[in-house]
Image: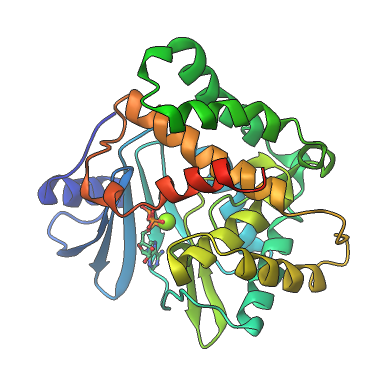
Amino acid sequence: MNLLFNHNEIIEQIHNTLDVKPNTSIRLKRMVHGVANSVYKFSIGNSENVIKIYHREFDSKLSSNLLNWCSKVGIPVPPLISINDNIAIYRYSQGTHKYVLDNEMIANLSVIINRIHSFPIDEVSGKNLIEKIRVYYDYLINISPKIIPNKVCNKILSHYENITSKKEIHSDGLYVLHGDISPTNVLWVNKKIASVLDFDECSIGPRMYDVAVTACKFSLGCHNTINKNYIDHFFSIFLKCSSHISSKTEINPFIDLYIMKVLLEKFFLIETHQIDCNSKRQKTDPWQKWANYIIEGDV
Ligand SMILES: Nc1ncnc2c1ncn2[C@@H]1O[C@H](COP(=O)(O)OP(=O)(O)OP(=O)(O)O)[C@@H](O)[C@H]1O
Ligand SMILES: [Mg+2]
């Protein structure tokens, strides 16, 4: 993959992608420089935009389909200007990230999640979430068994079949999922959602997975560890906003599925050298706590 880190190369890429006149000045400011991608804000004249540069493979097709559909049906997302397998350019959205949500904000987020799940699934093809996770599992168990670093990883692998064989996970039907509704991927203006960002994790799978991801990620925002009380509270508000979901649909198997995905993907990416497990960003990652949750929790 073609990595673009250099300031001038990024400017050149913007010029080429947007067909900007040669002497136009572009002001570029780095926002996030992560292991999987880098994000910069840039201005041309009065227009403010964001360029995201991918450092690893990503499926731009389902992502742009879902994003364009959201914008058509009034779900707040930043307009997409250009996308390919290496870069995506969006209009910049105003708003701030919130790490602690009150009931009104949880309800607003639940409405948006439900609307995303009304995407007509027949209109797209995309990767199935369970199959996506299976690829990481197969790699770790069959292709690279020598790398399993410690007892924790072995236990995680042994829980995999148990989690994915749960009937709730398969009986919920298939929906197009955002896959990563988290504090850093939602912008707010006065308790209202100004923009849902980052459709890189979208896939096709059970809709309760999105609810579980959102509840876990916002619970981490408060405490940096998965908080069961917060998750239950989030879920109870979600149920009030979702007439089609009965409370019989338990959230727990989907939380386990999410944690399993994060853990297996992380091992996979470390083993295939697509991410550096010693990088600064990884050290702040609470994945070890999640591994403990899978092992000691009620899986
Ligand atoms: N269109 C946009 N308008 C405003 N801010 C944006 C936009 N796109 C991205 N950002 C900002 O850049 C940050 C990172 O963007 P994005 O979420 O797409 O990348 P990421 O690498 O997946 O980050 P993370 O892992 O933190 O979710 C966002 O949290 C947000 O603050
Ligand atoms: Mg993001």
From the top left corner, tell me how far across and down residue 233 is, in percent. Answer: 68, 72
Residue at point 25% right, 68% down?
Answer: 43
Q: Is residue 78 visible?
A: no
Total numbered labels: 0
Residue at point 59% right, 55% down?
Answer: 213
Q: Which is nearer the eye, 146 or 206?
A: 146
The relative height of residue 46 versus residue 260 in the rendered view (above or below) is below
Residue 81's image quarter?
bottom left
Residue at point 55% right, 78% down?
Answer: 101
Residue at point 38% right, 68% down?
Answer: 92
Q: Which is nearer the eye, 150 or 198?
A: 150
From the top left corner, tell me how far across and down residue 188 is, in percent. Answer: 49, 78
Q: Is residue 165 visible?
A: yes
Quadrant containing ligand 2 reads bottom left
Q: Quadrant of the N terminus?
A: top left
Q: Residue furthest bottom?
A: 190
Q: How is the image coloured?
A: rainbow
Q: Which is nearer the eye, 121 or 222?
A: 222
From the top left corner, tell me how far across and down residue 166 is, in percent. Answer: 77, 36
From the top left corner, tell me how far across and down residue 47 is, in percent. Answer: 32, 71
In the picture, measured across the screen, residue 242 lies left or right of residue 3, that is: right
The relative height of residue 240 versus residue 145 in the rendered view (above or below) is below
In the picture, measured across the screen, residue 244 lies left or right of residue 33, that is: right
Residue 170's image quarter?
top right
Q: Which is nearer the eye, 242 or 123?
A: 242
Q: Quadrant of the C terminus?
A: top right
The relative height of residue 251 versus residue 183 in the rendered view (above or below) is above
In the picture, measured across the screen, residue 42 lies left or right of residue 68, that is: left
